[in-house]
């Protein structure tokens, strides 16, 4: 694409809006953001114009702003699976309540989704998906704001023409899916940019995300922290984990994050038979990134 064509598209974004241009071009969310970033760094663009473009990028990246001191993080509950565990979920939210936490990040795979053996039996598969949604509507803990990332298991509902995200939120306003597939889920937490993903990939970090303080992901079903890139993986809150592995990182559990001046403090929790246990504490500081 020529420089002239890129500048024309950026001009359209400013006049007609990001989403309108995205739809018109039929591009991936990342593609348009990358183009905006490239143009903002072009020497022919004046400073005032650069500022305007960067404000558009920031607006599209940041979906929500939080002022809380603490936020709860849970992942991979797989409700509807033979391995889902309502007791773990109940004890997780009891801890959140005890800590005074109201806002929760769920890192995806809230549900199990469609059973693959019924892929050719639409009515049977649809019934099972609807039963999972009904289970969440009736039994998922209330009194919190749950911001959920779309996981690979949520996507399977479309196989049975079930608009899971919309139908669930129509009844449970406290369970909100953040975005559509392929979009970036960034939030501002006390002026620290947090990137929320279901699956952490090895793809290069886009330049417009270089100032992200912490990236949080699920999907792997185990706890891990990469200090070089500030990537935190959240364990599964179900029995769907690697029981045979000896490392404690495979224990099911959840995370509580504290936003302090010195950094973000990570508290990892797990479960004994009767007790919710605090496993570790670490501080994530800004320095030594990338």
Image (cartoon, rainbow, N blue to C red):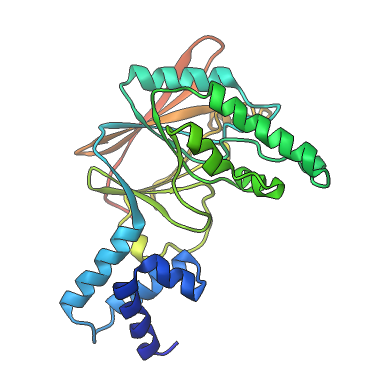
Q: Is residue 96 above or below residue 115?
A: above
Residue 245 appears anywhere in the view = no
Q: Is residue 181 left or right of residue 67?
A: right
Q: Quadrant of the C terminus?
A: bottom left
Q: Position of residue 187 (x, y in %)?
A: 33, 48
Res 199 seen here: yes
Q: Which image quadrant for residue 3? A: bottom left
Which of 93 and 203 lies nearest the eye of the viewer? 93
| Residue 226 higher or lower than 264, as above or below | below
If the image is split into quadrants, where does the N terminus sit? Answer: bottom left
Q: Where is residue 223 in the image (x, y as percent from the top left)?
A: 50, 36
User: x%, y% of residue 259?
Assistant: 26, 36
Kindly identify the residue that appears in the image at 51 percent across and 62 percent down.
203
Q: Which of the two residues, 116 or 204, is positioned nearer the viewer here?
A: 116
For the point 79% across and 46% down, which residue is it? 119
In the image, is 125 to the left or to the right of 50? right
Residue 149 in percent (x, y) is at 49, 44
Q: Is residue 100 left or right of residue 94?
A: left
């Amino acid at each position: 694409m020529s420089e002239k064509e890129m500048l024309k598209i950026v001009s359209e974004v400013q006049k007609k809006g990001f989403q309108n241009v995205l739809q018109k071009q039929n591009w991936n969310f990342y593609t348009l953001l990358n183009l905006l970033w490239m143009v903002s760094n072009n020497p022919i663009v004046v400073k005032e114009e650069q500022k305007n473009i960067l404000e558009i990028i920031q607006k599209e990246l940041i979906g929500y702003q939080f002022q809380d001191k603490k936020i709860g993080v849970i992942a991979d509950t797989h409700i509807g699976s033979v391995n889902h565990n309502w007791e773990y979920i109940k004890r997780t939210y009891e801890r959140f309540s005890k800590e005074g936490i109201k806002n929760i990040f769920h890192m995806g795979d809230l549900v199990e989704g469609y059973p693959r053996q019924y892929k050719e039996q639409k009515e049977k598969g649809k019934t099972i998906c609807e039963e999972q949604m009904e289970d969440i509507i009736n039994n998922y803990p209330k009194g919190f704001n749950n911001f959920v990332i779309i996981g690979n298991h949520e996507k399977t509902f479309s196989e049975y023409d079930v608009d899971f995200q919309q139908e669930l939120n129509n009844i449970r306003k406290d369970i909100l899916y953040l975005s559509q597939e392929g979009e970036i889920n960034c939030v501002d937490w006390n002026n620290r940019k947090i990137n929320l993903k279901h699956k952490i990939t090895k793809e290069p970090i886009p330049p417009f995300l270089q100032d992200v303080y912490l990236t949080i992901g699920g999907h792997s079903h185990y706890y891990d922290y990469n200090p070089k890139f500030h990537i935190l993986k959240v364990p599964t809150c179900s029995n769907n984990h690697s029981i045979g592995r000896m490392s404690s990182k495979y224990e099911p559990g959840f995370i509580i994050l504290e936003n302090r001046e010195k950094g973000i403090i990570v508290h990892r929790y797990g479960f004994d038979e009767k007790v919710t246990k605090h496993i570790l504490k670490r501080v994530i500081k800004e320095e030594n990134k990338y």
